[in-house]
């Protein structure tokens, strides 16, 4: 493709001050010149098939567009591929400024550029050979965990499903896959007729790029108010878009996670516990975005990952003190989930997500036994016991958290809007009822219904908070306060399984060490160095 991709060269852009990262379009060229350049480029692209997906590759990837496999974490030099931005395409652009010095960009065809900032745009190109996508789809699911549980069930039935997140979490499998008991997947068929191509804007010149594109930033890359060391990749995903990925060593990744998840001011033992869990979670979840060719995202669908430079000395000491160790069950990394506060009682895994029980994530009262005795609380909690728990929380670990106890009032209009987002045309909600609770007292099934005889909607487990975002947790009781108004009285913030961050901070202040805190929230687990854990392919 000589007309599109010239021989390798180095272009030095005119020097200038670093610019803040922007996602919106900018006028870099005169309109007439830009349209003329695009017309020339697109005319050349129409006759070039070197980048088309051949029929053999289409047959090998019937569910989605093909992407290169992401490498599994290495125990000796673990490095995560973390998406800083995903689903990039369309009319917007991407500005990548260096924090200091120049960036170096090299695409798969050898086109090389060095500049203090890189400007990228996207061009829609028709495919000479359309890609036929055919898949069975389950979902949407409220979380990756619930989607993964269904994928595991389908896999046990003989299918080869994958978990994907085009917008919400879904499970995909090939048409003709064995049926999954209790589920009816929908068939999704469509032709992919175009592709988005990244364009490099260099002064008054536009050049097409071949992915993956490698970006090196010796002085750091400015991104969303922070600075990231990289290196970086711009690569295509399974949905026709592009992803900006940072290749970050695991321990540096923790510097960007721990302070955002628990706060840099937490006591040393609590910071160390968070470091172990964040490391374990990353290792256990390295397959989370395998369908798109990277390990993890940087937002709340994974662990929040920010500028590692802002971690501070206490966080760095906690990460170093844990020595690359992970928390395991029978030598395997555990499902290292954690949350802000459990409201005084931990949840079992199966109370939060669809899936099999886990021996180290069991319901338990999280407080001082001597103070608990007068309340006569035993699991499972029934409605009356739950009311006693919610009325008095002085006995619980982390009871000083601002959302340890909470109340929310939701009216019929709010609940009806939530129901109609799932089922258009749903009648006005006039009844709200808890159908099932788990051993910790958490709501497993919440019914929203219209007048007698009208349709009803049942939200289960993680779908409750996914659709009623006003509720901090599912540990609540519902009280009708008049026509069209309900009071939700509850405790805790988050799903409630695993470590309570507020509880860990409280226990650390009482003198508990790392091992004792982890043993309290994950009984029967063992700390092991990453090198002792069997490698797992994504």
Image: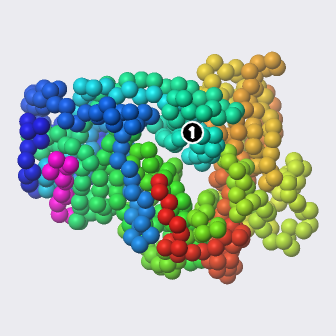
- Can residue 306 be seen here? The reply is no
Residue at 76% of width from left, 33% of height from top? 447
Q: Is residue 400 magenta?
A: no
Helix, strand or loop for the magenta stretch, by majority: loop
Expressed as whole percent of the image width and height from the top left, the position of residue 223 reads 32, 54
SS at mark 1 in the image: loop
Check disc 1: other Cα within 10 Å, few if <14, some if 14-19, many if 20+.
Answer: many
Expressed as whole percent of the image width and height from the top left, the position of residue 224 reads 35, 53
Q: Which residues are magenta?
A: 98-110
Q: Is residue 100 magenta?
A: yes
Task: Name the quadrant of the N terminus.
Answer: top left
Quarter where residue 510 is shown: bottom right
Q: Nearer the viewer, residue 66 or 276?
A: 66
Residue at 85% of width from left, 53% of height from top? 381
Query: Where 234 sits versus 179, above or below?
Result: below
- Left/right of residue 524 with respect to residue 49 in the rendered view: right
Quarter where residue 291 is shown: top left
Q: Circle 1 sits on which residue?
A: 159
Expressed as whole percent of the image width and height from the top left, the position of residue 2 reads 8, 39
Query: Where 454 sits versus 388, above or below?
Result: above
- Left/right of residue 219 with respect to residue 1 in the rendered view: right
- Left/right of residue 240 with respect to residue 41 in the rendered view: right
Residue at 25% of width from left, 33% of height from top? 52
Expressed as whole percent of the image width and height from the top left, the position of residue 507 reads 68, 74
């Amino acid at each position: 493709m000589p007309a599109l991709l010239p021989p390798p060269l180095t272009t030095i852009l005119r020097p200038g001050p670093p610019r803040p990262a922007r996602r919106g379009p900018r006028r870099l060229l005169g309109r007439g010149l830009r349209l003329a350049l695009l017309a020339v480029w697109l005319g050349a692209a129409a006759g070039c098939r070197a980048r088309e997906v051949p029929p053999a590759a289409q047959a090998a990837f019937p569910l989605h567009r093909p992407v290169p496999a992401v490498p599994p974490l290495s125990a000796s030099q673990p490095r995560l591929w973390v998406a800083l931005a995903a689903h990039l395409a369309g009319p917007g652009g991407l500005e990548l400024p260096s924090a200091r010095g120049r960036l170096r960009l090299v695409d798969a065809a050898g086109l090389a550029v060095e500049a203090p900032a890189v400007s990228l745009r996207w061009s829609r190109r028709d495919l000479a050979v359309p890609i036929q996508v055919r898949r069975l789809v389950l979902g949407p699911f409220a979380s990756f965990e619930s989607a993964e549980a269904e994928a595991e069930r389908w896999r046990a039935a003989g299918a080869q499903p994958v978990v994907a997140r085009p917008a919400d979490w879904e499970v995909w499998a090939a048409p003709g896959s064995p049926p999954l008991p209790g589920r009816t997947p929908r068939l999704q068929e469509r032709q992919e007729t175009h592709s988005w191509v990244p364009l490099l804007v260099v002064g008054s010149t536009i050049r097409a790029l071949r992915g993956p594109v490698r970006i090196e930033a010796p002085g750091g890359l400015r991104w969303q108010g922070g600075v990231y060391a990289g290196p970086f990749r711009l690569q295509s995903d399974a949905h026709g878009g592009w992803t900006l990925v940072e290749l970050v060593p695991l321990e540096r990744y923790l510097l960007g996670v721990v302070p955002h998840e628990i706060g840099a001011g937490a006591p040393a033992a609590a910071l160390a516990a968070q470091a172990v869990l964040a490391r374990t979670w990353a290792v256990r979840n390295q397959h989370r975005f395998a369908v798109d060719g990277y390990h993890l995202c940087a937002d709340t669908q994974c662990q929040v990952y920010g500028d590692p430079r802002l971690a501070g000395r206490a966080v760095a000491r906690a990460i170093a003190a844990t020595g690359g160790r992970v928390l395991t069950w029978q030598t395997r990394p555990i499902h290292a989930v954690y949350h802000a506060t459990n409201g005084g009682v931990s949840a079992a895994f199966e109370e939060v997500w669809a899936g099999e029980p886990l021996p180290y994530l069991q319901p338990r009262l999280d407080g001082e036994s001597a103070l608990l005795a007068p309340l006569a609380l035993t699991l499972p909690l029934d409605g009356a016991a739950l009311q006693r728990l919610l009325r008095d929380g002085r006995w619980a670990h982390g009871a000083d958290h601002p959302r340890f106890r909470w109340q929310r009032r939701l009216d019929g209009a709010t609940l009806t809007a939530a129901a109609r987002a799932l089922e258009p045309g749903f009648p006005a909600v006039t009844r709200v009822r808890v159908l099932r609770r788990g051993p910790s007292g958490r709501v497993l099934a919440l019914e929203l219904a219209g007048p007698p005889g009208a349709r009803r909607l049942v939200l289960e487990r993680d779908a409750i908070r996914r659709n009623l975002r006003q509720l901090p947790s599912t540990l609540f009781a519902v009280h009708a306060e008049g026509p069209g108004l309900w009071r939700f009285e509850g405790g805790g913030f988050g799903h409630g399984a695993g470590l309570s961050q507020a509880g860990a901070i409280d226990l650390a202040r009482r003198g508990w060490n790392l091992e004792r805190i982890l043993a309290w929230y994950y009984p029967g687990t063992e700390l092991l160095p990453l090198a002792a854990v069997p490698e797992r392919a994504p």
